Amino acid sequence: MDFSVEFYETENGASPVRQFLDKLKASDPDDFAAVLAGLAKLRNRQYHREPLSKAIGDGLFELRHVGKLNTRVFWFFVKNRRIVAVHGIRNKGLAIPARDLAIARERMHDWQKREQK
């Protein structure tokens, strides 16, 4: 059985990951294609570990692509073999900025809170 990959949406229907991917497509089509391929691979559980993906704590994982800049998409698992992508970043360093981790966690908790209703 495969997993499904979904994008987090805010209460007003905005999709920050989709917006991130749209900007990436315009600025770096090669990295965009690689990240999109990586998201598609997440449907298969064999890619839920390194080197494509890595647990970063508190139930969050990162999809990693190394190109001109490091591109990361943060995601988490939910019931029924679902994956929800919540945040995307590009940076030069190996460390994940604390601000971006906080955004990813906040969106994960928002999604979980709204999904339980």
Image (spheres, rainbow, N blue to C red):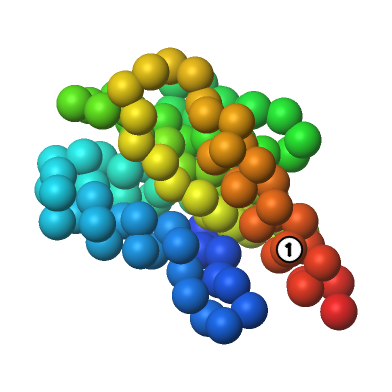
Q: Nearer the viewer, residue 53 or 106?
A: 106
Q: Quadrant of residue 90?
A: top left
Q: Residue at x 51, y 63 (%)?
A: 7
Q: Position of residue 70 (x, y in %)?
A: 33, 27
Count of numbered circles on the image = 1
SS for dot 1 = helix
Assign the C terminus to one quadrant of the image.
bottom right
Q: Is residue 39 above or below residue 84?
A: above
Q: Position of residue 43 (x, y in %)?
A: 50, 50
Looking at the image, the residue that sits furthest to the front is 99
Q: Position of residue 99 (x, y in %)?
A: 58, 38
Q: Nearer the viewer, residue 7 or 101?
A: 101
Callout 1: few (<14), some (14-19), or many (20+) C-alpha neighbours within 10 Å?
some
Q: Residue at x 46, y 62 (%)?
A: 16
Q: Position of residue 20 (x, y in %)?
A: 35, 56
Q: Residue at x 65, y 42 (%)?
A: 102
Q: Is residue 28 above or below residue 114?
A: above
Q: Is residue 38 above or below residue 109?
A: above
Q: Residue at x 77, y 73 (%)?
A: 114
The amino acid at mark 1 is Asp
Assign the N terminus to one quadrant of the image.
bottom right
Residue assigned mark 1? 110
- Residue 4 visible in rendering: no
